[in-house]
Image (tube, grey):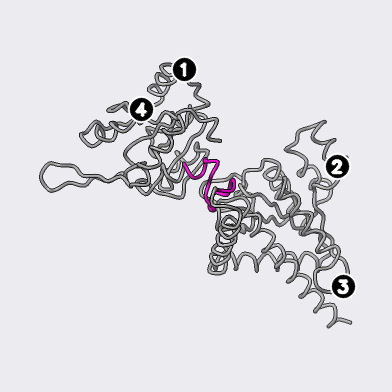
Amino acid sequence: MKNEIRALIFDIDGVITDGKKYTDGLSQEMKTITYKDLDAISDFQKEGIIVGCISGEDTLFSRKVAEKLDYCCLGTKNKRKMLEEFSDKYSIDSRHICYIGDGKYDIEALEYVGLAVCPQDAIYKVKEVSDIILDSSGGQGCIAELYAKISPQEDADSGAAIRNTGILETVRKRIHTHYEMIGQILSDQKLISVTEEVCQKIINSYRNNGQLFLCGNGGSAADAQHLAAELVGRFYLERQAYSAEALSTNTSIITALANDYDYNMIFARQIEAKGREGDVLIGITTSGKSQNVLQAFQCAKKQKLVTVLMSGKVNEYLPVLDYADHVIEMPSGDTPRIQEAHILIGHIICEIIESKLTEENEKNE
């Protein structure tokens, strides 16, 4: 991703500072910048990326910040216009500009660039138009976190190429990150409670001859097939088969719908054909933004299916949430870790369904 970015421009207040005003009680305004942001700015520049700021403030502090940058524009609220002028001056297409902002005056600028980024504590409307919502709040290392996320040598949290520290160190880091995530899941009472509710919904559906449908794209499609296989086949116990279908498996249906209609309809059309009131649909998506999962949920709600979303950490409004009865939200924004958590929770669901229904059948025999 970094190879596509030729310029990084950011707002000062609320991005590299916390957006608060501190004074000495007399006249001097005081603010701070973290060393890791200064280091990250230098790292971006070393890689040939133009780093600059566009800020509504024009103070002694902002001027000192600008001294370390390749470009600055201070004392302006029309940040999009300044970006357009910057694009013309440096002959850089807007698609190759990254902008980081947090407030209302940053919205048009974020909509203009190729990569829109905001801190965790940005206003809601800014988060809506941002491609990346950082875990860091303003003043807590936003530039450093972005560098880690789009660097070809990302750390364990952002999950990319193997670092120079070697294969063994990478293995240890990935295992450690996974271990930390499992600890977060274990202490997440909401996640555990929702998982219990989902188990009960599926069990109730099976008691009434209902069906379970699963859908997802890429690795999530593989997870959907995996979990369906556990229920149609067996998990631990010898028992009757349970009706479970991954909607990504019939290539003739999928290619026909994608070719004749729209790829975003490939799951919804199947739910329209097969889904009945009381059935359950599980949509697996690490981002929560898959349009074909959204359309499947919309169709499922019309037909009165129970809908379950398995996603990564939700940091913004997602349209699919309006159609999800239950959301199992993994405490991570890193795709591999989310997928690892999905299969863990999926296995637990399969085990509980199998155990409870088998126990009931044995009592009734």
Relative to 38, residue 184 above or below = below
Report the disc number at residue 70. Answer: 4
Give, as a three-letter code, the residue at label 3.
Arg
Q: Position of residue 123 (x, y in %)?
A: 41, 43
Instruction: Read off the magenta span.
Output: 147-163
Quadrant in the picture for residue 213: bottom right
Precedes in sequence: disc 2 or disc 4: 4
Residue matched to label 2? 251
Relative to 87, residue 69 above or below = below
Q: Where is residue 337 in the image (x, y as percent from the top left)?
A: 61, 55
Quadrant in the picture for residue 189: bottom right
User: Along the line of sight, which residue is nearer the eye, 51 or 43?
Assistant: 43
Relative to 210, residue 250 above or below = above
Badge 3 marks a residue whose secondary structure is: loop
Residue matched to label 1? 91
Image-based side of 356 in relation to 338, left or right: right
Give, as a three-letter code, the residue at label 4.
Asp
Give the residue drawn at x 60%, y 67%: 192
Report the disc number at residue 239. Answer: 3
Report the disc number at residue 363. Answer: none
Give yes or no for contact between labels 2 and 4 (Cβ–Cβ under 8 Å).
Answer: no
Relative to 299, residue 5 above or below = above
